[in-house]
Image (tube, grey):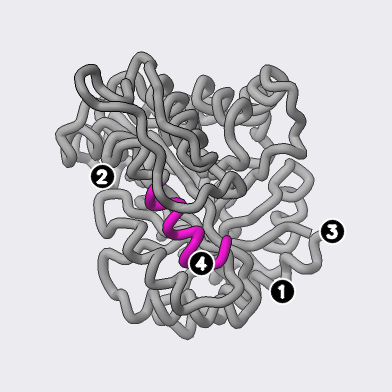
Amino acid sequence: MMRTATTVEASSGWPDIRDFVLEAEKLGLGECWVAEAWGSDAPSVLGYLAARTDRIRLGSGIMQLGVRTPVALAQAALTLAEMSGGRFALGLGPSGPQVIEGLHGVPFARPLTRMRETVQIIRSAFAGEKISFEGKAFRIPLPGESRPMRLSTTPNEDIPIYLATLSPRMLELTGELADGWLGTSFVPEGADAYFRHLDAGLAKAGRSRSDLVVCQGAEVAFASDEDELRPMVAGRKKELAFSLGGMGSASTNFYHDAYSRQGWADVAAEVRERWQSGDRDGAAELVTDEMVLATTLIGTEDMVRARLKVWRAAGVDTVRLYPAGDTLDERLATLGRALELVTEVP
């Protein structure tokens, strides 16, 4: 059976988010990943949730490369693992130039190199080793009077590292180094666009698919019939148009590229062109019903049940659910229905 998860981000409405996670744990949700994007930071939220929950696994989904040093990431992970009684997983991602350079003022250059070296340094810190590293992106310690140091925290090599990646080379690196993959923009019928690169990395490291947890996310929403479903799908088109045309920069948009590799290159290019020109409504009109339904779990209960089976057959180990609803009670009700359906998937 697939494991279940969700992702929250605490930039606003914190009381509802807190209550949502606490109630989701009671419903039996397996994991909660905390995002930071360009809003709230993840470790603060995770520390709070570690103190208030008992069973649910917590993860950073994701902390961004370049915002913290590799050792600072390791310190946060070791601290959160200790605070949660071993329930923490470290999720890392490269983010994109708009956030890394535009918000933090840190160069986005060489994300592949920085990701590889960051994971290597973190694993050294997790092992309790003196940290001595000389690579292309990082040099620890710097030349001079400093000497290699080890963290004073208790070593913990059991903290899993998940990578949120989309580009082919990053996916290959994920297969080579990571314990799990936090994916998005996923179409199970086009899964080979991801898995062939993940599998190449796994083979390079002498590993198999069973060594990598595939965690995929999608909005889940239920319609009573086709008439109710149509406006729900239409309402998601502008959100998808933003991902295709507004995320990242004019030349670097990993979501656009991911959809392109899964069969929608022409549409994705047109959506980005219209979005970048300021025609947001025109961009949304180009998004098809198929694009929305293929990458979400929106539909009647029978449709969602069928899609969950397709996701499992495609190789998804953990389904990350984003339940729809205008209120806390509605989101929890949607989540509860989805969790029941997941239990029916072998």
Q: Check if residue 84 falls in the magenta segment.
A: yes
Please, what is the three-letter code of the amino acid marked with disc 3? Pro
Mark closer to the chain start, 4 or 3: 4
* C-alpha gap between disc 1 and disc 4: 27 Å
Task: State the separation of the CA atoms marked 3 and 1.
Answer: 12 Å
Q: Nearer the viewer, residue 316 or 112?
A: 112
| Badge 2 vs badge 4, beta-carbon distance below 8 Å | no
Q: Nearer the viewer, mark 1 or mark 4?
A: 4
Quick one: quadrant of the N terminus? bottom right
Q: Residue 6: horizontal and vertical position, in percent?
A: 53, 62
- As shown in the figure, which amino acid type bears the numbered disc 1? Glu
Density class for disc 1 (Cα within 10 Å; few <14, some 14-19, many ≥20) is few
Residue identified by numbered label 3:
346
The region drawn magenta spans: 75-86
Residue occupied by mark 1 = 340
Q: Residues within 10 Å of mark 2 (few under 14, many from 20)?
A: some
For residue 175, what is the image quadrant?
top right
What residue type is disc 2 on? Answer: Arg
Where does label 4 land, which residue?
Answer: 84
Q: Is residue 55 left or right of residue 41?
A: right
Question: Mark 1 falls on what kind of element?
Answer: helix
Horizontal and vertical percent position of residue 78: 46, 52
Q: Is residue 307 magenta?
A: no
Mark 4 vs mark 3: give the one in front: 4
Q: Which residue is mark 2?
A: 280
Q: Earlier in the sequence, mark 2 or mark 3?
A: 2
Q: Are marks 3 and 1 in contact (CB under 8 Å)?
A: no
Badge 4 vs badge 3, beta-carbon distance below 8 Å:
no
Identified at 29% across, 75% down, the residue is 13
